[in-house]
Image: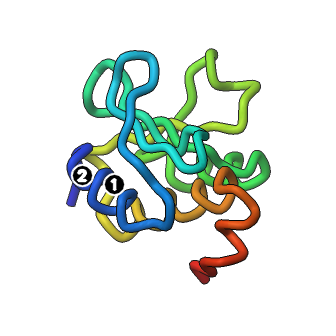
Amino acid sequence: MGSTFKTVEAIGLSLPGVQLGTSYGTPALKVGGKLLARLREDGTTLVVPVDPVNRDFLLRLEADIFFLTDHYRDYPWVLVRLPRIGRRRLREALEEGWRLVAPKRLRAAHDLA
C-alpha cells in the first residue's frame, strides 16, 4: 500500500481534461484551469478539494490518511498522506475532487459514475 506523486499523475491524467502543471512551486494537476491536486513541499502530502460535509467524515473515519492543518481548516480542501493511501482510495479521492472543480460542460460530457 502507499502512493507517490507518480501514482497521482497516472490517475489524474486519466481523468478528462486534466493537465500537469505547478502550484506554489510544486507539481500539480489542473482541470479547466482550476487546481485539482498539488503536492506539498514535503513531497509526501497531497492537497485535494473535497466536499466540506464529506471532509468531516474523512477526518474522523480515515484519520490515518486524511488530515488538516490550520491553514486549510476554513477551505474545502483536505490533505492526504500519500504513503498511507492505496491506489484505489486515491482514485476515489481524485475523482471526487475532479467532480468538484471540473467545468460543468466537461462533467456533463464525462460521467465518472
Residue 75 is left or right of residue 90, and the answer is: right
Give amino acid for label 1: Ile
Please, is residue 113 above or below residue 57 in the view?
below
Q: Is residue 39 left or right of residue 35?
A: left
Image position, residue 92 (x, y; %) = 49, 66
Task: Report the disc number at residue 85.
Answer: 1
- In the image, what residue occupies the spot 40% across and 59% down? 90
- Is 43 on the left-hand or right-hand side of 97? left
SS for tag 1?
loop
**Total marks in image:** 2
Cα–Cα span, label 1 and label 2:
6 Å
* Structural crowding at the residue carrying mark 2, measured as other residues with C-alpha within 10 Å and reported as few (<14), some (14–19) or many (≥20): some
Q: Nearer the viewer, residue 52 or 23?
A: 23
Q: Secondary structure at mark 2?
A: loop
98 in relation to 6, above or below: below
Name the disc covering residue 3, or none: 2
Q: Quadrant of the C terminus?
A: bottom right
| Front residue of 9 and 110 | 110
Which quadrant of the figure has residue 106?
A: bottom right
Please, what is the three-letter code of the amino acid marked with disc 2? Ser
Q: Are marks 1 and 2 in contact (CB under 8 Å)?
A: yes
Q: Residue at x 66, y 50 (%)?
A: 101
